Image (cartoon, grey):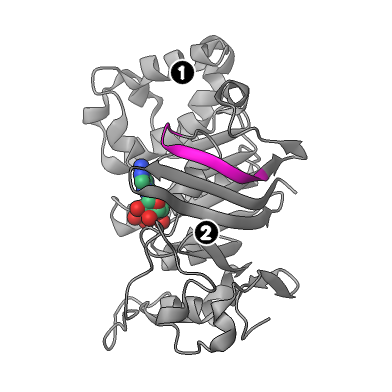
């Protein structure tokens, strides 16, 4: 098992109180697994990714543990996390490609990053060139400034840089959302190739685009208002979702694989609850057509069949 997350709670401290962005999150990631992480805006996807690499000053680790390859990941201890970053866990943050330093050539940026990690760039130059070629980039990109590259090229550069030290876990946060459809697919295929070649062991791919994730991920995990509601193999989430929220989320999509949207997309009525004072019990109950009295208690996440987890009193 690459990753074990157990009852993780990470809150944001604000003047109005704690925002409970991750409120008891539990899941595993097997060796080699690519997991798509889905859910409406604000459900905690980015917070989960960030928690595994660096808590910013407003984030507080309130409880729970993360284990990577059997070892504790000390997320609350910034110094202790330093040796793990890039080498064990790597994050491609949202908007990473627009955050590339515009005044530095790509090659110089890579060298600076490697030196900061105690790696001599010369020792890794051949591997860097091999990987750039693998994602369809000419090694000449190293002599260019970010502004000279297209969005898709920049995203591939970021991907190569983030995985150069072969981390166990790569978290990719919305890495394809700013790209056109064919470039999205090419980037997603490169990520699968990186896993197949062992450049990364396992991957969490955060996205709003379930159809893209369906094409590349082994499993999909769905979050709602700081909780995990369902996790299962990708085909199960698409074809036989069990949690009412997942069913509505999938029902709101155009048919996976179809190029034409027929009929109207049914949105999910209502909005998720605020996480400053979230309601007790199931957080989806106010929008759930199947809610009943028991939903005032929080449903546990249970394995309803091998590899299929859901948190709903109706499915347990
Ligand atoms: N710096 C912050 N201070 C206070 N609350 C925050 C902060 N960052 C995020 N939050 C809150 O934490 C919750 C989870 O946010 P997060 O960004 O993790 O969601 P998300 O699912 O990644 O959303 P999106 O899909 O829009 O990126 C939201 O309620 C959000 O408002």
Instruction: State the residue position of label 1.
Output: 113
Q: Is residue 195 magenta?
A: no
Q: Is residue 261 above or below residue 234?
A: below
> What's the magenta bit mostly, secondary-structure-wise?
strand
Residue 179 location in percent, x, y? 30, 51
- In the image, taking residue 126 as reference, residue 265 lies left or right, namely left
Instruction: State the residue position of label 2.
Output: 36
Q: Quadrant of residue 139?
A: top left
Find the residue positioned furthest to the front.
16
Q: Is residue 63 magenta?
A: yes
Residues packed near mark 1 inside 10 Å, few (<14), some (14 to 19) or many (20 plus): some
Q: Is residue 176 visible?
A: no
Q: Which residues are magenta?
A: 56-65
Residues packed near mark 2 inside 10 Å, few (<14), some (14 to 19) or many (20 plus): many
Instruction: Decide which of tag 2 and tag 1 comes sooner along the chain.
Output: 2
Q: Quadrant of residue 28?
A: bottom right
């Amino acid at each position: 098992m690459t990753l074990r997350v157990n009852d993780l709670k990470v809150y944001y401290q604000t003047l109005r109180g704690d925002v409970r962005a991750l409120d008891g999150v539990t899941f595993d990631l097997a060796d080699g697994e690519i997991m798509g992480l889905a859910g409406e805006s604000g459900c905690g996807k980015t917070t989960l990714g960030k928690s595994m690499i660096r808590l910013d000053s407003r984030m507080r680790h309130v409880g729970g543990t993360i284990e990577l390859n059997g070892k504790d990941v000390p997320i609350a201890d910034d110094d202790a996390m330093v040796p793990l970053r890039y080498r064990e866990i790597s994050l491609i943050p949202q908007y990473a490609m627009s955050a590339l330093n515009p005044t530095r050539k790509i090659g110089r940026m890579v060298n600076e990053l490697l030196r900061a990690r105690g790696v001599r760039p010369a020792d890794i130059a051949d591997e860097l060139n091999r990987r750039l070629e693998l994602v369809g980039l000419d090694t000449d990109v190293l002599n260019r400034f970010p502004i000279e590259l297209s969005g898709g090229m920049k995203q591939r550069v970021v991907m190569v840089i983030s995985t150069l030290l072969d981390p166990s876990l790569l978290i990719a946060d919305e890495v394809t959302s700013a790209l056109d459809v064919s470039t999205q697919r090419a980037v997603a295929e490169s990520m699968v190739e990186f896993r197949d070649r062992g450049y990364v062991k396992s991957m969490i791919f955060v996205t709003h685009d379930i159809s893209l994730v369906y094409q590349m991920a082994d499993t999909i995990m769905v979050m709602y208002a700081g909780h995990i509601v369902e996790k299962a193999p990708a085909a199960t989430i698409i074809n036989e979702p069990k949690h009412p929220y997942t069913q509505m989320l999938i029902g709101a999509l155009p048919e996976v694989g179809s190029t034409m949207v027929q009929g109207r997309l049914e949105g999910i009525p209502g909005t998720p609850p605020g996480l400053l004072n979230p309601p007790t019990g199931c957080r989806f109950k106010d929008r759930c057509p199947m809610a009943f009295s028991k939903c005032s208690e929080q449903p546990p996440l249970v394995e309803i069949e091998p590899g299929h987890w859901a948190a709903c009193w109706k499915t347990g």
